[in-house]
Amino acid sequence: MKEELITGVMQQMLPYLDNAQLKQLKQVMEQILFYYEITDAEVKQVEDDSNELMAMFIAAKRIEGCSEKTLKYYQTTIAAMITSLGKNVRHILTEDLRTYLTDYQSNHQSSRVTIDNIRRILSSFFSWLEDEDYIIKSPVRRIHKVKTASSIKETYSDEDLEKMRDNCEELRDLAMIDMLASTGMRVGEMVLLNCDDINFTERECKVFGKGDKERIVYFDARTKLHLQEYLDSRTDNNPALFVTLRAPHRRLQIGGIEHRLREMGERLNIPKVHPHKFRRTLATMAIDKGMPIEQLQRLLGHQRIDTTLQYAMVKQSNVKTAHRKYIS
């Protein structure tokens, strides 16, 4: 109760005192209140503005360029925390959030990765509240990153890629596989492509990544030929690069591509065939062949180089070769 009282007073004084003065105020209040017992009293409840603050945070993130999908995830995560704790976000303490994360993991049987994702979102929210002077200090500061087990993500072998190419029953599927394999683009970026976005002369195309960030990606000669064959075979006038096989030939969606590739993987006995696996395969191959990590980061459209390093898995055979070259 004392801590909440001190926090409340300091929040009220935020506009009038600097950090050093706030620190001094806190020390003085702690010393004086040490000799007193604080009890609850009937007080008029101050209107809870938690949802209003959350809406302002989401608006700030929208201005920063976050996608609507990301914003929805942020809002759902923060709203769940507010509802569960039942407190004004201005009064939430570190202990409240630790208990919330522990209970959430227990009740939902969530992985450590999921819990750390929630922690990161809450950290972003409370750091924004701190920066905007709505709270004195983020309660997430003392909640450290959740340690997660690192696992080696699988990539396609050369044999897997050739097997998929050889067993494509439709020109569209062949062009689609080549496009994913040679550009490393996200499947969400590919479904947004139009025919006019393709520059066959330069073998490149413009894509819009996360947060509507624009970049150029490149494809190889084989992809160019298969893409041209596919487009020449089409009889529809849909501007989309990839469309459904049946009339009225609508723009192909992410779910349709995932379903098509999953079916192919089951038919050819190739495990875990998924669009994102092409992107990871390209990243690994690029690193394997000595592509500078900064260039790969730009090619994949990553904002942080740490993300690129997570995608690029060095082959164990090359580690062995490097050991013999530099150490043995």
Image (cartoon, rainbow, N blue to C red):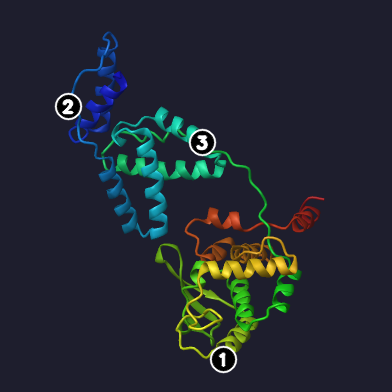
Identified by mark 2, the residue type is: Lys
Q: Are marks 2 and 3 in contact (CB under 8 Å)?
A: no
| Quadrant of residue 326 within the rendered picture | bottom right
x, y percent for residue 153? 66, 55
Badge 2 or badge 3: first in the primary sequence: 2
Q: Is residue 87 above or below residue 300?
A: above
Q: Which mark is residue 18?
A: none
x, y percent for residue 289? 68, 66
> Which mark lies nearer to you, 2 or 3?
3
Q: Which residue is mark 3?
A: 107
The alpha-carbon separation of the residues under discs 1 and 3 comes to: 54 Å
Identified by mark 3, the residue type is: Asn
Residue at screen point 66% across, 57% down = 313
Task: Assess disc 1: are there few (<14), some (14-19) or many (≥20) residues with their C-alpha within 10 Å of its C-alpha.
Answer: few
Helix, strand, or loop for circle 3?
Answer: helix
Q: Which residue is mark 1?
A: 232
Task: Assess disc 2: are there few (<14), some (14-19) or many (≥20) residues with their C-alpha within 10 Å of its C-alpha.
Answer: few
Badge 1 or badge 3: first in the primary sequence: 3
Helix, strand, or loop for circle 1?
Answer: helix
Residue at screen point 69% across, 67% down = 265
x, y percent for residue 304? 49, 56
Identified by mark 1, the residue type is: Asp
Residue at screen point 39% across, 54% down = 72
The foreground one among 274 and 8 is 274
Task: Assess disc 3: are there few (<14), some (14-19) or many (≥20) residues with their C-alpha within 10 Å of its C-alpha.
Answer: few
Q: Which residue is mark 2?
A: 44
For the N terminus, the quadrant is top left
